[in-house]
Image (spheres, rainbow, N blue to C red):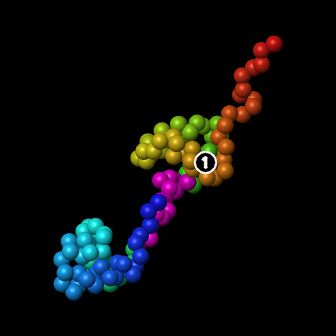
Amino acid sequence: MARPLDIDLRERVVAAVLSGQSCRTVAESFSVSVASVVKWSQRLRATGSVAPDKMGGHRPYVLAAERDWLLGRLRDEPDITVRALAAELAERGIFVSHVSVWNLLKRENLTHKKKRARQRAVSS
């Protein structure tokens, strides 16, 4: 994964732009893209710093708000399928795939597998 360029380079580039040089000239002399020079200059004006923002981050789970409802629904009807749960969520206006429901169950350490009593009969 790429990482941001050093703050020292960013500061020197922005200082050159502030001294009156054009963005293209500065980009060529520091071997960076013109877009980077423009973005760093804009960032300095907007935030007062040329430091990069945090990369990556945590994406909130789609069903985080529906967690309690789903777990309650599983307590009420333990044999309900993941696809049926996704269909019930769609009726409530939350359109997700069965995989999203499965991922929530997995995070909650709930296995949602067929029970031994429901397995196929053994042939004699």
Q: Quadrant of residue 35?
A: bottom left
Q: Residue at x 67, y 43 (%)?
A: 111
Judge whether residue 32 can be spotted in this image.
Answer: yes
Of all residues shown, which one is farthest toward the top? Answer: 124
With 119 as the anchor, is 92 left or right in this view?
Answer: left
Is 64 one of the magenta-colored residues? yes
Of all residues shown, which one is farthest toward the bottom? Answer: 19
- Of residues 76 and 60, the one drawn nearer to the viewer in this rendering: 60
Q: Residue at x 65, y 40 (%)?
A: 112
Where residue 52 appears, x then y in whole percent?
39, 74
Where residue 13 appears, x then y in whole percent?
30, 79
- Of residues 68 and 20, the one drawn nearer to the viewer in this rendering: 20
With 15 as the anchor, is 122 left or right in this view?
Answer: right
Report the span colored magenta: 53-67
Q: Is residue 12 above or below residue 90?
A: below
Q: Quadrant of residue 22?
A: bottom left
The residue carrying pointer 1 sits among few (fewer than 14), some (14 to 19) or many (20 or more) residues within 10 Å by Cα, namely some
Q: Residue at x 75, y 31 (%)?
A: 116
For badge 1, the amino acid type reads Leu
Prevailing SS of the magenta stretch: loop
- Of residues 60 and 9, the one drawn nearer to the viewer in this rendering: 9
Element marked by disc 1: helix
The residue to which callout 1 is attached is 105
Q: Quadrant of residue 25?
A: bottom left
Q: Is residue 8 above or below residue 122?
A: below
With 117 as the anchor, is 105 left or right in this view?
Answer: left
Where residue 6 appears, x then y in whole percent?
41, 76
Judge whether residue 42 can be spotted in this image.
Answer: no
Where residue 14 appears, x then y in whole percent?
28, 81
Q: Residue at x 77, y 19 (%)?
A: 122
- Label count reads 1
- Of residues 94 and 16, the one drawn nearer to the viewer in this rendering: 16
